[in-house]
Amino acid sequence: MKKIAIVTLSDFNNYGNRLQNYALERIITSQGYDVVSLVDFRPNLLKTSVKTIIKKDGIKFTDRMKKIRRLKNFLDFDKKYVNTFPVNAGEFSSVSDDEYHCFIVGSDQVWNPDWAKYTYDRMFLRFCSPTKRISYAASFGVDKIPEKYKAGLIDFKALSVREDKAVDIVKNTIGITCHKVLDPTMLLERAEWDKIKKMPTKINGKNYILTYFLGGRTREVEKVIYRYAKLTDSAVINLQDYNTPYYTVGPDEFVGLISKAKMVLTDSFHATVFSIIYEKPFVVYDRHGSGKKMGSRLSSLLEMCGLNDRRASALDEKMLLQVDYTNARLAIQKEKVHSLKYLNEAIQSCGDSVG
């Protein structure tokens, strides 16, 4: 059985990161390959817990404990569902090229220049043969990239990205029109996600609106959230709030909470993705503060699905709980065929000369 390595960001605090990693592994494994995800580290729960408890940063002890429980839930998910292998001391040059049929970098913002100083060599797969380098749904997360990315991009055997803007960046940088493919989470059918989703026991069948904002929430957005909650006779669950028990939920519970929500309000790409997968009413907001320039991926997603009217700035509130997913289903299925074809052909072609 041929062995394939996925190279992705090792973020054990981000739902989308872990879920896209699981999905890409699941898809490639289903094609009959042995798959491992190479990361530069996997947190040690005990050591991290001690550091979190003794660290003097003004965070209350109860909130520190919630951070630890959240990390435990992420690590439990990873242990159960993702074949993660931490490369010794992050030295990817020590990875044996001969051990793997190919290396696939993606998905997520693996090419974001904000952390290129630390990730360039491994996220552009500079440690392995160019004939074994594949990208799948890689994302830049920005509008402009460093000059050195040209050398990184040009040596790939097969190149694909996640957003329309990223296609333009690659074209303008190396003169190649690369493939735009679906985020791995959208390659799996809803029934596949149903197999791993979990519901927090504290829900107890109540109606709720789920909010997940990675950027700041303005006072106006806060007012809208609670107005919608009153309108739909729902509680509000804020996944980013230390003061609620939901801050600690793991990736499987993230999927579960979206699947049963009355409505989802978010500035997150993957919260939007799973709202679409589960065909939930949702509203997308522009991100404020950290990551506010990362909107191209959401724009591509909403445009593809014909759901631009779910942006807060375009929403007709008479249609708040009514979303027509007919066109979205057709578009996703079409893109899924293209994405899987690209991935399978890219894997099969590895070992041949570049170009």
Image (tube, grey):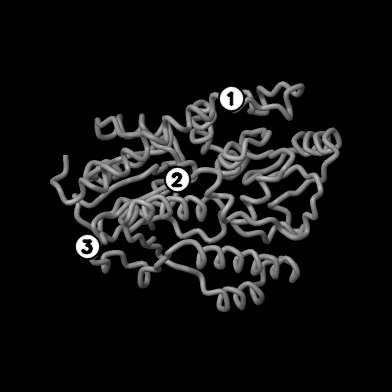
Residue at 61% across, 54% down: 197
Mark 2 neighbour density, 10 Å: few (under 14) some (14–19) many (20 or more):
many
Residue at 55% across, 46% down: 191
Report the disc number at residue 61.
Answer: none
Mark 3 neighbour density, 10 Å: few (under 14) some (14–19) many (20 or more):
some
Mark 1 neighbour density, 10 Å: few (under 14) some (14–19) many (20 or more):
some
Determine the secondary structure under disc 2.
Answer: helix
Residue at 80% across, 44% down: 207
Q: Which residue is mark 2?
A: 184
The answer to whether 178 is drawn above or below residue 202 in the figure is above
Q: Which residue type carries mark 1?
A: Asn
Q: Position of residue 11 (x, y in %)?
A: 50, 58
**Of 94 and 342, the residue lying toward us:** 342
**Of 250 and 1, the residue lying toward us:** 1
- Mark closer to the chain start, 1 or 2: 2
* Image-based side of 109 in relation to 168, left or right: right
Q: Position of residue 55 (x, y in %)?
A: 64, 73
Does the image show residue 279? yes
- Mark closer to the chain start, 2 or 3: 3
Q: Which residue is mark 3?
A: 97
Q: Which residue is mark 1?
A: 308
Determine the secondary structure under disc 3.
Answer: helix
Q: Which residue type carries mark 2?
A: Pro
* Image-based side of 260 in relation to 236, left or right: left
Query: Do the residues bearing badges 1 and 2 touch, measured as CB atoms within 8 Å?
Result: no
Q: Position of residue 70 (x, y in %)?
A: 64, 64
Does the image show residue 243? no
- Mark closer to the chain start, 1 or 3: 3
Q: Position of residue 275 (x, y in %)?
A: 62, 39
The answer to whether 223 is drawn above or below residue 127 in the figure is above
Q: CA distance from mark 1 to mark 2?
A: 21 Å
Nearer the camera: disc 2 or disc 3: 2
